[in-house]
């Protein structure tokens, strides 16, 4: 999922960018040295069975669809609320929803396969993500604050004030990779940083001053989509390297990078393109927007109007769903 950071205008941001850089460097220094006080009080938590959620008009079901070579979890919500899907656990056993999404007071909803819920009151909600094993999650609230949440109990603590943007990447050791931004309302500067389990922010992981999104690769490196003078680039960073994977040119949005290095993006007024390998040429896949890869890069979801469409890497349509959905790992049920 791409980060909600707009591309800057072509002109007139130079002085604003320099001011923002100065502000963000001061902020980063304060966080790294413990100079910014953190609000560590846990947020209120409500546990609901599926029956209790139904009585309150807040039923959410996770509906699993087995496909050729994969699986997708569809979100079905009853009642008047229209929660926004933020993330689904890698195995599809739970999902993270925002009610509502944005800077206003919100609820982070952890929904399980049995329909039970954990609901956490948050000061707004901009992003959330699971770790690779589904036993850790991080959320970014409406002020840009970073929270660590136990998806099993709902226990939480505010890890760092930021402001950050996401979705974050959650490590097994409790660390989180996120974007440190100039502000959540006007993120003209967004620098990639790592936050450890104690809330300490490491120096910038990339020299890029406007990073749109970061994606873990199977090699252990990161792929990042960044603003460049000619439009948008995808770069590989890690272990002292910073190299170009693809120059997407002007007009590319909604960048997604699979763990195997495949790249998808939206361009040309609503068409999804795929680059199969670094240095390869883009090829048109299907109409739509917001491509998101599954774990192995062979399937991806694409938004077409109000529907989510699952397509294979050759463009074959496999499933069409009425609302939000996410690809998940598929084991014995898929014959693997």
Image (spheres, grey):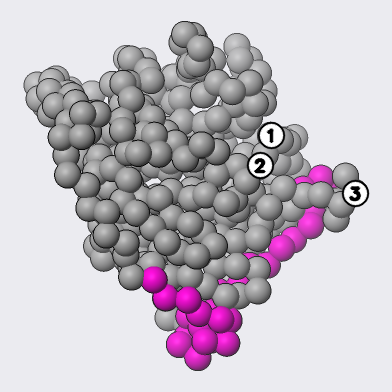
The quadrant in which the C terminus is found is: top right
Q: What residue does disc 2 label?
A: 294
Q: Which residue is drawn at 37% across and 18% down?
A: 206
Question: Contact (CB < 8 A) between labels 1 and 3?
Answer: no
Check the image and report above or below for 114 versus 185.
below
Q: Quickly name the residue at label 3.
A: 335
Q: Residue 219 carries which label?
A: none
Left or right: 232, with 315 as reference point:
left
Residue 194 position in % (x across, y down): 38, 30
191 vs 234, left or right, is left
Q: In which quarter of the image is residue 76?
A: bottom right
Rendered location of residue 235, percent (x, y): 48, 17
Say whether marks 1 and 2 touch (CB < 8 Å). Answer: yes
Work out whether mark 1 precedes mark 3 in sequence or the reverse, and give the earlier one. Answer: 1
Residue lying farthest to the right in this orientation: 335
Label 1 vs label 2: CA separation?
6 Å
Is residue 276 visible in the rendered structure shown here? yes
What whole-number distance in Å separates the C-alpha atoms at marks 1 and 3? 18 Å
- The x and y percentages for residue 203 are 31, 21
SS at mark 2 in the image = loop
Query: In front: 163, or 79?
Result: 163
User: What secondary structure is marked by label 1?
Assistant: loop
Foreground mark, 1 or 3?
Answer: 3
- Which residues fall within the magenta stretch? 45-70
Disc 3: CA contacts within 10 A as few (<14), some (14-19) or many (>=20): few
Query: What's the residue at 65%, 35% (across, down)?
Result: 285
Give me the residue at 79% from left, 53% from top: 67
Q: Can residue 315 be seen in this view?
A: no
Badge 1 is on which residue?
Answer: 297
Disc 1 packing (10 Å; few <14; some 14–19; many ≥20): some
Q: Is residue 274 magenta?
A: no
């Amino acid at each position: 999922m791409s980060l909600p950071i707009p591309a800057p205008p072509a002109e007139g941001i130079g002085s604003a960018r320099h001011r923002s850089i100065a502000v963000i460097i001061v902020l980063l220094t304060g966080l790294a040295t413990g100079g910014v006080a953190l609000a560590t009080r846990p947020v209120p938590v409500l546990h609901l069975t599926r029956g209790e959620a139904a009585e309150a008009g807040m039923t959410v079901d996770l509906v699993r669809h087995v496909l050729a070579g994969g699986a997708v979890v569809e979100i079905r919500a009853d009642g008047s609320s229209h929660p926004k899907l933020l993330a689904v656990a890698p195995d599809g056993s739970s999902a993270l929803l925002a009610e509502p999404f944005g800077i206003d007071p919100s609820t982070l909803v952890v929904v399980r396969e049995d329909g039970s819920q954990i609901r956490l009151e948050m000061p707004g909600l901009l992003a959330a993500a699971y770790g690779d094993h589904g036993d850790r999650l991080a959320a970014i609230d409406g002020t840009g604050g970073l929270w660590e949440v136990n998806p099993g109990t709902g226990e939480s603590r505010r890890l760092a004030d930021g402001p950050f943007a996401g979705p974050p990447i959650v490590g097994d050791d409790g660390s989180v990779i996120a974007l440190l931004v100039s502000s959540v309302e006007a993120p003209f500067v967004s620098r990639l940083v790592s936050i450890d389990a104690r809330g300490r922010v490491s120096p910038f992981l990339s020299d890029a001053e406007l990073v749109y999104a970061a994606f873990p690769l199977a090699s252990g490196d990161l792929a990042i989509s960044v603003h460049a003078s000619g439009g948008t680039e995808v770069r590989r960073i890690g272990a002292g390297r910073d190299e170009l994977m693809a120059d997407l040119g002007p007009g590319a949005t909604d960048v997604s990078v699979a763990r195997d290095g495949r790249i998808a993006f939206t361009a040309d007024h609503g068409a999804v393109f795929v680059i199969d390998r670094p240095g390869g040429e883009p090829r048109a896949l299907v109409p739509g927007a917001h491509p998101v890869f599954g774990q192995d890069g062979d399937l991806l979801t694409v938004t077409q109007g109000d529907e989510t469409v699952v397509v294979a890497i050759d463009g074959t349509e496999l499933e069409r769903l009425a609302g939000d959905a996410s690809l998940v790992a598929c084991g014995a049920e898929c014959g693997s």
